[in-house]
Amino acid sequence: MQDDLQYPDADLRRIFRDSRTVAMVGASPKWVRPSHFVFRYLQQKGYRVIPVNPQNVGEKILGETVYGSLADVPVKVDVVDIFRNSEAAGPITDEAIAIGAKVVWMQLTVRNDAAATRAKAAGLEVVMNRCLKIEYGRLFGELGWCGVNTGVISSKRLRMNR
Amino acid sequence: MSEKQSFGFETRAIHAGARPDPVTGSRNVPIHQTTSYVFEDSEQAAALFNLATFGFIYSRITNPTVAALEERVASLEEGRAAVAAASGHAAQFLAFFTLLEPGDEFIASRNLYGGSITQFTHSFPRIGWKGALVDPGNPENFRRALTPKTKAIFVESLANPGGVVVDLEAVAAVAHDSGVPLIVDNTLASPYLCQPLEWGADLVVHSTTKFLSGHGTSMGGVLVESGRFDWAKSGKFPSLTGPEPAYHGLNFYETFGDFGFTMKARAVALRDFGPAMAPMNAFMTITGIETLHLRMDRHVQNALEVARFLEAHPRVAWVSYAGLESSPWHSLAKRYLPRGAGSVFTFGVKGGYEAGRKLVEACELFSHLANVGDTRSLVIHPASTTHRQLTDEQRVAAGAGPDVVRLSVGLETAADLIRDLDQALEAAAR
């Protein structure tokens, strides 16, 4: 990813290792949407993913009930994953702070520096303009399968899981 | 990439894309000589077919050995992603098919490998793609050839066979002013001598058959994406930024971001036309790349010695090697090819077409064949071979006139190469 944001691999690995539950704001029930790809991929990697989308409240996405807001999610959330535009990411970040999430993750093209500053001040970690699925695949060996330059070089056996 | 690549070129030439196998610990990249891969279950199979997860289906689309090569070349070019193909020509096809619709146009340098000129001027028009060939000596020539239908500009960083060096930064600026990508064929330079993406190119293609593989054993090609081109900005590339009908309406740029172009080239062009690289060829090429930096330094050193010998030879009319001070491209070479101007160049033998033909036949150490970038030294008379399909005018424009002899200087002892050319020049004069 070509931007001025820097997220050391060690920090991202720690986020993947220490997190269990992801609340995905803007999760789409349509299988062809990017959010749906990330949703099922994270489920397959053993994360619980909870969809948040006011347009689909009460429906199910890949077996999980859709909630209208982060405040409605009845379980503890580690990562708030934002599939909304950069402006909308502001108030969503504030909700993430309010529910005690540990990480705010904004997907590709989503970036809100002011929200990031507020989240960091509240003790949260923030990742912007990155994809959870792509970064997981990059750090744990799967992204290179489709010819992507992962930047990972090591003489150790590849560990495929976090 | 989160961080600027922190490993040096040589380290990446040996390690990028190739960690020890997670199951066996195999240190070298295994040759995955298989057509297909067992699915975990039907749900995983469906996810793979939808591109919703990473994994292997069929070796026409992805193969673990080929993937290791793809990542390695992407790393050496400082690109974001790469897709390999059966040959350099196939890689070019993947690039154009992913960019152009029928009726679209592109602009190319007229100084190209003869096979590319034929591909562009005879076969591509039958798919509905029209290419304009321009003299790359003045970057403004590209600007003058632009039309609203232009979707790409294509050049060779170091042109085959004429030794022409293109002002990449200036041509990239012309391309970007009009919202189209610059594609650079970096075959003759290799990523060790030239880094086109650093100068603003957006896509790089290689015939890996040449210096990357390096030993004349394996056909192959690769297409590398920088990850920096904004496909949405100009509105000229709806098939990347809108729903793709060949993939259930998937939006490749939105879904895969800075490697969306590569994913589309693979999942549509490679899938549907099928010019996949063989795993064995990928393995041979990976092995070759591990010594690329050492080989290129020696290729350049030998080429310079041979070129200086020829320049001083009474039976040689001219030498076109950008590594020589006499070359009109010497200053561009110093900028874009700081470690040397490669080892493929041309010279003119006094006596024209007949003398050129005779010289090639008289060589005892240089091999007379149609390839470049081998450990062995190679010689050919382009007018009667690689550029035969072109018109007389196109041949001269491409640097393949009647008296032109092309050398690919290999890694033998330089004095032996010089002795062979010396006797062949004498024989050609008889």
Image (cartoon, coloured by chain):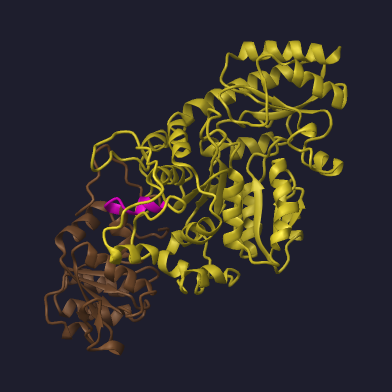
Chain colours: A brown, B yellow
Residue in the foreground of this view, choosing between B201 and B334 = B201
In the image, taking residue A124 as reference, residue B11 lies left or right, namely right
* Residue at 36% in and 66% down: A129
* Residue at 65% in and 65% down: B178
- The residue segment tinted magenta is A139-147
- Note whether residue B125 is visible: yes
In the image, taking residue B426 as reference, residue A103 lies left or right, namely left
Would residue A144 be counted in the magenta stretch? yes
**Quadrant into which the N terminus of chain B falls:** bottom left
**Quadrant into which the C terminus of chain B falls:** top right
On the image, the x and y values in percent for residue B107 come to: 71, 56
Placement of A142 over or under B77, stated as above or below: below
Would residue B369 be counted in the magenta stretch? no
State the image quarter where residue B384 is shown.
top right
On the image, the x and y values in percent for residue B82 come to: 47, 50
State the image quarter where residue B259 is shown.
bottom left
Placement of B285 over or under A126, stated as above or below: above
Can you name the residue that lies furthest to the left here? A75
On the image, the x and y values in percent for residue B247 come to: 47, 69
- Note whether residue A111 is visible: no
* Residue at 56% in and 56% down: B273
Number of marks in the rendered image: 0
Residue in the foreground of this view, choosing between B272 and B260 = B272
